[in-house]
Image (cartoon, grey):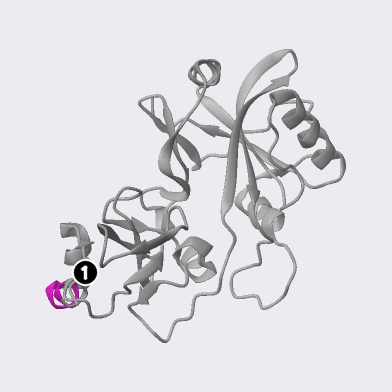
Amino acid sequence: MPRMLDVSDEVRAEIGDEEADRLLAGHNAPGSYDCTSCRTPGDSEQERTSTVLFIGDETAVLAFAHATCLPSQVVQVTEEQLQGAVKSITGDTVDLEPHKVMPQQAVLGVTSGLVLIAGELHPALVVEPTAPIVRPGSTGLGDDFLPLLIEQGFMPLTAIGSVPPVLHGWSVLLAMGQLHAVLQPGAAGGAPVAWWQAHQPLQVTDSWRAAANKHQQVLMFAAPVGSIGRQPREDLLRNALDRAAANGKLVAAALPLAGV
C-alpha cells in the first residue's frame, strides 16, 4: 500500500530512484513506526512521514519521523556514532547494509541554565542521558558516557570553581535566538556534525541568550544518567551539578557559538 512519505531530493540522491520509488510504493517502509525525533508512534499510511537518512563512513541507515517533527533530510554522523546508534533511530529503520547491526543507545536530555562562576553568570547546557551509555561495539552493561567524553577533550570536574577550557572543534549552534544543536568535529577534518540536535529548536531565556552573546561561548556540563535529574530552578540545578562534581560524575568544556 502506498505510504504518505516525504523523500527529499538529497535523500533520493543518496539511496537512488529505485529505492525511493519502492519506499513510496510501500515496500521496505513500515506502516507504523516510532518517530526518530519525538519517539511517539506514527503511521505512514495515515500521516505525512519524513525519511531521514543517517550516513556514517561506511554505513547508511534510513529512519522515519513525523513530517511535523523533522523534514526529510540527510544527516552526516561519524561511523562510531552510527554503530553506537542513537536509540531514536533504532527499531523502525531500513538498514541499507543489512549485515551491519545497530545496537541501542540512550537519548540525551539537555537543560539550559545560567551558572554563576567567580561572580559572573555563564550560559550552560547540562546533558544527561536517559540510560547508561556503553562504548560502541561493547556488549557490557557498564556506563562509558564520561570516559567517551573525556576522550573527546572534556575535562573531569571535582568542583565548579572556574570556567572550563575551550574545546576547539566543538560548538553550540544558536540561530534566530534558539538552540538547535551541539556540533562536534566531522570525520577526517570534514564539516561539523551534530552530536546532539533538537527535534524542534529550543527556546532559551533572554538572559541566557544575552550571556551567550556576551561570552560568545556556552559551558557544557555532562553527567551519567541519574546524576542531575530535571531541576525546576537554576539554584537546584547548580546544587545538582555541585553534587555530581563532588561525586566525580561531571565533565565540562566551554564550546564556542556556531550561530548568532
Q: Position of residue 24 (x, y in %)?
A: 18, 71
Q: Is residue 207 left or right of residue 94?
A: right
Q: Main secondary structure of the magenta part?
A: helix
Q: Quadrant of the C terminus?
A: top left
**Residue placed most toward the observer, 145 or 205:** 205
| Residue 84 falls left or right of residue 71 | right
Residue 4 in the image: above or below residue 127: below
Give the residue type that dot 1 points to: Arg
Residue 179 can be seen, yes or no: yes
Q: Is residue 220 above or below residue 122?
A: below
Mark 1 neighbour density, 10 Å: few (under 14) some (14–19) many (20 or more): many
Q: Which segment is the magenta one?
A: 16-21
**Which residue in the structure is indicated by mark 1?**
3
Q: How many marks?
A: 1
Residue 34 sits in quarter: bottom left
The residue at the point 70 percent across, 34 percent down is: 231
Q: Is residue 105 left or right of residue 115?
A: left
Q: Is residue 18 magenta?
A: yes
In the structure shown, which secondary structural element does the residue marked by tag 1 occupy? loop
Q: Residue at x 45, y 46 (%)?
A: 197
Q: Residue at x 55, y 74 (%)?
A: 103
Figure check: 211 above or below 70: above
